[in-house]
Amino acid sequence: MFEIIIGILPFIIPSSVLKENFASLLLFLLGSIYIIKNKNKVKENKYFYTLFIMWILIIICQIIISPYIESISGSFLYMNMGIYYLVYGSVLRYENKDEILKYILISIAALSIFYIIYHGLYQGIRIFGNIGYANSYAVLHLVGLYLNRIRLKDKSTDIIEIILFIGLLFTGSRTTIILSLIYIVYKLYIDKKEKNIKLIYSLEPNALAIFIYITLEKLRLVSIFILPIILIFYILIKNLKYRDKIYYILGALGLIAVILSNSKTINRIKEISIADGAFQERFVYYGDSIRSILKSPIGNGINMFQYKLFENATAFYDVKYIHNSYLQVVYDTGVICFIIFIIVITVGFIKIIKSKNVNKNYLILAYLTILIHSLVDFDLSFSTFPIILVMLLVLSSIDQSKNNKTKIKNKDNEKQVFAISKYFYIVISIISIYLMIFEGTIVLGNYLIDNNAELADRIYSFSNNISFKRDYRGYFNRAQAKKDIYDKNKDNKYLQEAISLLETSKNINPYDPMVKWNLSYLYEIIGDKDKALKYGEEVLEGEKFYPGAYIKQHDYLIKLYSETADKKYEEKIKALEDYYYENYNNLNKRAKYMNNQLQENYDDIRNKNLDYNILLEGKYEKEVVYYKEEDIKDNEIDKIDSGVASMAIILSSMKEENISPIELADYYDSSVEFFQNIVKQDKYKLQVEKLEANEITKVKRLLSDGKHMAVVLIKSGELASEDNYIVLYGIETKNGVNYFLALDPNKDNIIKVKASLFLEQALGYWVYSEE
């Protein structure tokens, strides 16, 4: 029973819940226990020793460049390759192979059904399963399809294929779906060549899976009631004599339905383009990480990319992995360890190619699937996939003839030149238990913090006590717990404790910008302006391409300026804008395809539906002429209203001549097009730009230069009892708040209006300037 459990565990371990470090350590511990219990049955060889040496070098590398628990724990991912090479070499013996493969596939299929229902139907998202990442979970499904073909066929074979293919589609992984075409083509080839099965029959499970996927994706939970009808219909057709003709008809209709389908996965495939953001941003990751590797060829530390990426980033992105497993390995462990890793992978591939296993082509394709997909994603950062690679190698070492009699190629009775003592495994297992306890407290605390901050605080305290200040996460997370406790009882001592914890976090891990973000935020709460600004500036130094960092710092500086009127804050605001444009000019050209990037205009990083204050002063440089609507009521011209009067103010002021509302009334047709059409006349020629209501920041910038005036249409509200036109001719900042200088033709005054009111009431702007 333990052999079955240890065999299926790497495929079903819930890394998404336990997190990768804890899951990797747990796999190592259980694998080591199996080896210790069965030391006489486990046979080490040169390939294992190569894996072992690689891990030792990686450990040494981490101790030198990244002596953190987070990195040491992460290194066990590589040790698991060696451990499970021995484990599978032992458990996949003789009749065990098909039994264990069957349980592996049933387990993957069962979990897939659960996640299809929970993620796909209930939540309506791409399923990411126990792996925690949809693209890698898709690879697990595709590898499962290959494994399903190398075991003895039984009643569950087609059912498992259907489930795994449906799960693959629900992941929405475009690369894996494309790779699955290789599986389908090879399956068709083998079925035709060796079993003389018609292609249409060989495609049955996959076609049914696609049809079920589209039904499930469209109808969501309701489809659970429709699914039995589909299956009954399929069973009835399957037993018909001429079912192949029906399949061709249904296949043609199905192909049309797939092409026209609006399903998420189909749409994702249709959207594949070289200009696709997901595609382009990977090239940014690759270029930036290569620069980091060249700067530090001995490695940067496992799990450190998420913190150190900002040092060499040329655009903004906040990811944990590089999205290329090979770059990730060399980034984490250094060039020497990477070379050994590549040798290990290559030797394993060559061994499979040279094997005499009748199913070696399926094993080769499964192996290549992982290696190819890892070029564009980080599959090898999950323990599951390096373990699968060595499992495929072990499977290839089983000589299997077509009559299904199997034997292990490894020579059990061959004398070993060297054998690692079981006491070594015991010592490393004890170390892994210590690391598991620490990683477990981090995972448990993270799940508790939102509902029970006090208990999470105690758990993090324990993790800090056993970390010997070799990991910052316990301190950082405990600071969050202290802040949550403060939010409940408003006792400032918890804020001070949180700050102290964050300062310790920063000393341990100076790379994580979130530590500095939180320090800036907490110092702002307690009123320490200088330290709040200092850490805000440190955030900007690290995340210089992140728009949110500029927004936060700008708003805080405006707040300080409004409270103190200190000119130094005005200077800092101007310096912040200069720093923004300096970094914008260094932004990676591919960033235009990515979300949340610096924009050409400083103001455009903001949500256009929100107003924000800018340090601006300026009004129209010429004398402004003023007309009131009531001045011309006696002229008995019904067409004259605030719009005509506003336009007369603009033209008279800019042209420096008397252009009365009565004169303009001849051109007015009561439509908003008047404000653009009138300045096309030679006599009234001006430049005009029509701006939307949410482009208020651009209006501010234009009015501040002394060369622009604007007409704004406002709806009834605080500024007017009915829809009305107002002239804007300047802007000023008072106590950090922006005010428009306005002329209202409906009132006998020149007014200053808080700019934020226009965001709520403006319907549109016409901004004018001379040619």
Image (cartoon, rainbow, N blue to C red):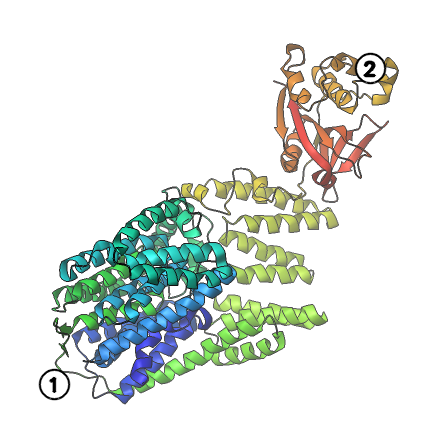
Residue count near mark 1 (Cα–Cα under 10 Å), binned few <14, some 14–19, many ≥20 = few
Do we see residue 75 in this rendering?
no
**Residue 489 image-quadrant placement:** bottom right
Give the structural element (helix, strand or loop) at label 2: loop
| Relative to 433, 644 lies left or right | right
Q: Residue furthest right?
A: 634
Q: Where is residue 716 in the image (x, y as percent from the top left)?
A: 78, 36
Do we see residue 247 in this rendering?
yes
Q: Residue 637 carries which label?
A: 2
| Mark found first going from the N terminus, 2 or 1 | 1
**Between 12 and 741, the one nearer to me in the picture:** 12
Instruction: Check disc 1 and report the residue beneath it.
Output: 413
Numbered label tally: 2
| Relative to 233, 452 lies left or right | right
Q: Quadrant of the C terminus?
A: top right
Q: Type of residue at label 1?
A: Asn
Q: Label 2 vs label 1: CA separation?
A: 112 Å
Give the structural element (helix, strand or loop) at label 1: loop
Q: Where is residue 181 in the image (x, y as percent from the top left)?
A: 27, 53
**Between 603 and 692, the one nearer to me in the picture:** 692
Q: Type of residue at label 2?
A: Ile
Residue 183 position (above or below residue 570): below
